[in-house]
Image (cartoon, rainbow, N blue to C red):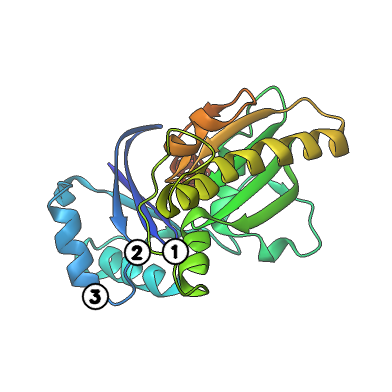
């Protein structure tokens, strides 16, 4: 089995793959203070580590990357594939500074590379990323603050607003402080998604498919007006493709 890691600023998505198929996935909180051994113990409660024969990592948190690399080398005796310079992805990046494009964006684009139509991948994580992919090429990206960041900004910069759970209120117009804030960070993000889809379509003159992924996609997807699909394992699927793309060809 192949052990896959998609490391974000809030969560670590973990995938287990057999061949070209992800058979299970889990989430752990991203905690930079945790040691490699503590992460390994947490993983052992979820995964039979003796069955792992390969490791692939996509990460935007360097301190966690080092811990996962340590787990792979020291505890699993495996050299991990880490998405970065020198790794074959099969995706072209037409941006001003291609090296700045994060590993998670690359993996999301690789996951949709074989689609007949162009795609807009919307990753609802700590930051919200909109990745426009056409003909195996990333042609543009939008990055906005995610729901958790928005809540922290509200609570941290106001004297009276409380911290809240991310839940969808029954009505858009709230009638108390908590539902007002919940409406803003759920219906507000859904409105942002719908609005940016319209603007990207107007700019590209393209009828692309829209795929939502990320930790909050399950919450936000039902609130959007545009037709879309949801794939919570999209980045892991792209990472798995990249792993296979970098294996030696057997003779």
Label 1 with label 2: CB-CB less than 8 Å: yes
Residue 35 left/right relative to 202: left
Label 1 with label 3: CB-CB less than 8 Å: no
Where is mark 3, residue-wise?
35
The quarter of the rendered structure image containing the N terminus is top left
Q: Residue at x 82, y 29 (%)?
A: 206
Helix, strand or loop at mark 2: loop
Residue 38 left/right relative to 183: left
Dot 1 or dot 2: first in sequence order is 1
Judged by depth in the image, the label closer to the viewer, 1 or 3, is 1
Question: In the current view of this chain or complex, which residue is farthest to the front?
Answer: 175
Q: Residue at x 34, y 64 (%)?
A: 30
Dot 2 or dot 3: first in sequence order is 2
The residue closer to the viewer here, 38 or 77, is: 38
Q: Disc 1 versus disc 3: distance between alpha carbons?
A: 16 Å
User: Around disc 1, counting alpha carbons within 10 Å, would you say few (fewer than 14), some (14 to 19), or many (20 or more)?
Assistant: some
């Amino acid at each position: 089995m192949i052990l896959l890691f998609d490391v974000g600023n809030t969560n670590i998505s973990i995938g287990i793959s057999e061949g070209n198929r992800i058979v299970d996935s889990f989430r752990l909180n991203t905690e930079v203070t945790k040691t490699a051994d503590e992460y390994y113990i947490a993983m052992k409660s979820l995964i039979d580590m003796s069955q792992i024969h390969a490791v692939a990592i996509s990460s935007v948190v360097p301190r966690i990357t080092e811990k996962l690399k340590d787990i792979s080398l020291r505890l699993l005796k495996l050299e991990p594939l880490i998405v970065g310079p020198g790794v074959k992805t099969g995706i072209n990046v037409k941006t001003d500074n291609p090296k700045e494009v994060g590993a998670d964006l690359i993996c999301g684009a690789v996951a949709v590379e074989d689609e007949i139509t162009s795609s807009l991948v919307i990753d609802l994580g700590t930051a919200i990323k909109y990745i426009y992919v056409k003909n195996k090429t990333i042609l543009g990206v939008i990055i906005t603050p995610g729901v958790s960041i928005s809540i922290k900004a509200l609570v941290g910069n106001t004297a009276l607003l409380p911290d809240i759970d991310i839940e969808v209120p029954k009505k858009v117009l709230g009638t108390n402080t908590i539902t007002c804030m919940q409406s803003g960070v759920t219906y507000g993000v859904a409105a942002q998604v719908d609005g940016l889809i319209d603007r990207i379509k107007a700019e590209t003159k393209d009828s692309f498919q829209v795929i939502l992924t990320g930790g909050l996609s399950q919450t936000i997807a039902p609130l959007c007006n545009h037709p879309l699909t949801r794939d919570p394992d999209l980045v892991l699927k792209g990472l798995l493709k990249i792993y296979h793309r970098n294996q030696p060809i057997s003779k």
